[in-house]
Amino acid sequence: MKIACFNINGIKARIGALSDWLKEADPDVVLLQEIKSVDEAFPRQHFEDMGYTVETHGQKSFNGVAILSKLPLEDVTRGLPGDDTDEQARWIEATVVNRRAVRVCGLYLPNGNPAPGPKYDYKLAWMERLRARALEMMKDEEPFLMAGDYNVIPQDEDAARPEAWSSDALALPQSRAAYRRIINLGMTDALRAFDPGLEQYTFWDYQAGAWNRNDGIRIDHLLLSPQCADLLLECRIDKEVRGREKPSDHVPVWVRLDA
């Protein structure tokens, strides 16, 4: 089973680029972030014609997450538990049914800038809710993964120029500590487990020639539960997608599971 996450930075602007990548990479499941679309405006039929079941949790102009799946989906839920007043569309989860059922959780974690401030407080509170959800799912002892744009640079090695991010919400000590608390539950960073090499980035800003200079950061992660990590066969970043016409500023990251 091949499962990918991809922050597409607006479905309307990236439908062509996304479709091309889907045809080439042929993932079974894709967790999308920043669709920037309400549910009824998402081009559902287009992707259904490509063989995908579509589930969305949209929001006008901002945020929004979705699941595209060639495999059956069960028990689709929307919204990260823990705050009934949170109206931002940043979380969707479902069980993918194949040889082995896997619970997939797609997330778009808050950016948090400017920090300090209310946006950063929201980010840290959201991360604590994420940790609580992971802990709850751990109790079932079934394979699950949490994948998407975490808006966290876990370590200095995950940035081409770490000094440029030292005061940014993505790399502040509190953000990294919150990320480690999730990892320390027993989660596995799939990319680091499969390939610990350097200069593996998933985001390059549109400004200042960041792509041409490979001035990137790694903020899109697939975290696997212990049972899911046991199924890990491969994890890759499709870096070349960033150099195509009308790209997102993120690129897809994917895992292949023995499931």
Image: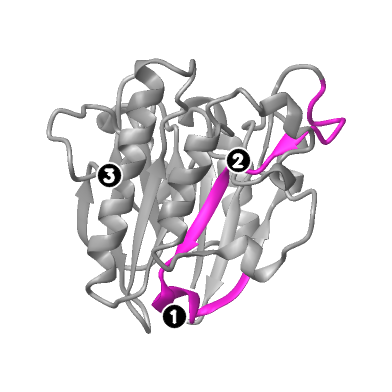
Q: What residue type is labelled 3?
A: Arg
Looking at the image, can residue 235 be seen?
no
Residue kind at label 1, given as amino acid type: Ala
Whole-number angstrom distance, CA of label 2 to CA of label 3: 19 Å
Q: Which mark is residue 56?
A: none
In front here: 243 or 124?
124
Magenta stretch: includes residue 227: yes
- Residue 156 is left or right of residue 121, and the answer is right
For residue 259, the mark is: 1
Where on the picture, by quarter, is residue 13? Answer: top right
- Residue 145 visible within the image: yes
Q: Distance between the residues labelled 2 and 1?
A: 29 Å
Disc 1 and disc 3 in contact, CB within 8 angstroms: no
Q: How far across and down, in percent of the image, does residue 177 sit?
A: 48, 45
Position of residue 52 in the picture relative to residue 210 (left or right): left
Residue position marked by numbered label 3 in the rendering: 129
Q: Quadrant of the C terminus?
A: bottom left
Residue drawn at point x = 38 percent, y = 31 percent: 123
What residue lies at 59% left-to-right and 24% top-to-bottom?
168
Provide residue 36's location: percent of width, then percent of height: 40, 26
107 drawn magenta:
no
Dot 2 or dot 1, earlier in sequence: 2
Residue under pointer 2: 153
Relative side of 249 to 144, left or right: right
Give the residues drawn in magenta, as a range. Answer: 209-235
Q: Residues within 10 Å of mark 2 (few under 14, many from 20)?
A: many
Q: In x, y percent, where is residue 145? A: 41, 63
Q: Residue at x 12, y 34 (%)?
A: 84
Q: Please identify, in this view, whether the residue under mark 1 or under mark 3 is nearer the observer.
A: 3
Give the mark count: 3
Q: Are marks 2 and 1 in contact (CB under 8 Å)?
A: no
